[in-house]
Amino acid sequence: MGSHTQGNGPKRANGSREAEILDLLQRAEGALTPGEVTERLGGELTYSSVVTILTRMHTKDLLTRTPRGRAYAYTPVTDDPGFAARRMRSVLEERPDRQAVLARFADGLSDADADLLRQLLGSDQ
């Protein structure tokens, strides 16, 4: 039995596709159209799949878009640390007991991270 896959290769989770496209857009020198994203992905995804993913990411406020010709050109709203911080905030906001979540989070921090957080919060005065 051959282990190679047919068609478009192995199915990837939507989240990993979004992450891949986000990374590509962050490394670009400016906004990219769906056609440019499709091209840079090397034909891994169809044009319509790329449009669908970009539209979904725009709806989630991960990307901004500006008209370019008959398409939109997309650019990330923020950089990678900014996205990570937004994800952390949204997870926190989904939970009813913020204090418990923050307490557990703080308990799990390394000493170095805890010190850094104290510095950032300005409690070391």
Image: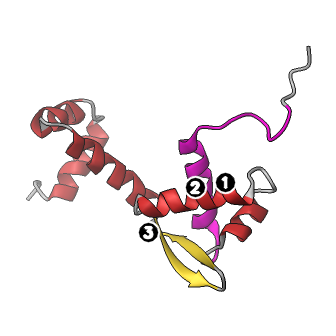
Q: Against 67, is 116 above or below?
A: above
Q: Which mark is residue 75?
A: none
Q: Residues within 10 Å of mark 2 (few under 14, many from 20)?
A: some
Residue lying farthest bottom? 69
SS under mark 1: helix
Q: Against 80, is 34 above or below?
A: below
Q: Against 64, is 81 above or below?
A: above
Residue 32 percent across, percent down from the top left:
64, 73
Marks 2 and 3, Cα distance to the nearest angstrom? 15 Å
Residue type at mark 3: give it: Val
SS under mark 2: helix
- Mark nearer the N terminus (2 vs 3): 2
Residue ID for mark 1: 49
- Check whether the beta carbons of the residues at disc 1 and disc 2 lie within 8 A of each other: yes
Residue under the point 49% across and 58% down: 57
Marks 1 and 2, Cα distance to the nearest angstrom? 6 Å
- Mark nearer the N terminus (1 vs 3): 1
| Quarter in which the N terminus is drawn | top right
Residues in magenta? Answer: 6-29
Q: Camera-side residue: 48 or 122?
A: 48
Q: Residues within 10 Å of mark 3 (few under 14, many from 20)?
A: some
- In magenta segment, residue 107: no
Residue ID for mark 2: 53
Residue ID for mark 3: 77
